[in-house]
Image: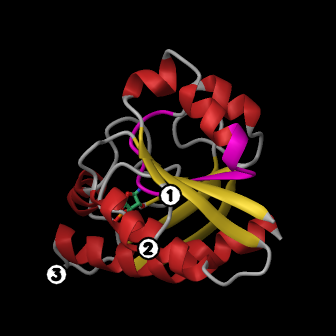
Amino acid sequence: MNRLVILASGSGSNAENIIQYFKKHTSIIVTSVVSNRKDAFVLERAKKLNIPHVYFPKKAFFEDNLVLNHLVKNADYVILAGFLLKIPKNIVKAFPNRIINIHPALLPKFGGKGMYGMHVHNAVKEQGETETGITIHYVNEHYDEGAPIFQATTPVLKTDSPEDIAANIHLLEQTNFPRVIEEAIL
Ligand code: GRF
């Protein structure tokens, strides 16, 4: 079995979609969900779906090895689904080419510090982009700079609001993320 641990900080719609997709999979299994935010909705989603879930404070990621130990014990691959902390070096080192992130833009555009959630879609709108999309990529020590695995695009119409863009991105994420994870692993 290829075991996945999902790291997420927010709502967790991607996490839920991934959990559902692999529920009856013969060789890939989600073993747990980890969040750095105690009140993240992703933890409730995991609970409802009967997936072990755990909150770790920032300190557990950076100052001691609690998260690293959890991952080493439970994961062959680490999936970042809306996870907002930078991944500590010791975790990157322990999982070379085994950490996969999704970014809601066409990297290298609109990546880096501060580029998450609506900040990304607002920037896309402000810069008058005619298309945007998603990037699924491996994670290295630099923010949003690991090798790309997959990109998909969606047009941005002049009449689209940042919220419209967000909705289109959401659709691309739901359609592609689990399948791309599956292909990257198998
Ligand atoms: C997604 O847009 C993802 O690309 C980004 O954060 C968002 C997470 O949404 N990295 P959700 O928590 O999965 O609903």
Q: How many angstroms separate mark 3 from mark 2 (CA)?
A: 38 Å
Q: How many angstroms separate mark 3 from mark 1 (CA)?
A: 42 Å
Viewer can see residue 26: yes
- Disc 1 marks which amino acid? Pro
Q: Quadrant of ligand 1?
A: bottom left
**Above or below — where is 76 with respect to 121?**
above
Ligand 1 under 8 Å from disc 2 Cβ: no
Q: For mark 1, what is the residue?
A: 52
Q: How many angstroms separate mark 1 from mark 2 (CA)?
A: 9 Å
**Above or below — where is 148 with respect to 132?**
above
The disc, 3 or 1, on the residue closer to the chain's N-terminal end is 1
| Occupied quadrant, residue 149 | bottom right
Q: For mark 2, what is the residue?
A: 49
Q: Secondary structure at mark 1?
A: loop
Viewer can see residue 147: no
**In the drawing, does residue 107 fall left or right of residue 129?**
right
**In the drawing, does residue 117 fall left or right of residue 89?**
left
The residue depicted at 71 percent of the width and 38 percent of the height is 72
Q: What are the residue bounds of the magenta stretch?
A: 72-86
- Disc 2 marks which amino acid? Leu
- As rendered, which of 100 and 113 lies closer to the eye? 100
Mark nearest the camera among 3 and 2 is: 2
At which x and y percent is residue 147?
70, 49
Q: For mark 3, what is the residue?
A: 159
At which x and y percent is residue 123?
26, 53
The colour mode here is secondary structure
Q: Secondary structure at mark 2?
A: loop
The reply to whether the magenta stretch includes residue 98 is no
- Disc 3 marks which amino acid? Thr
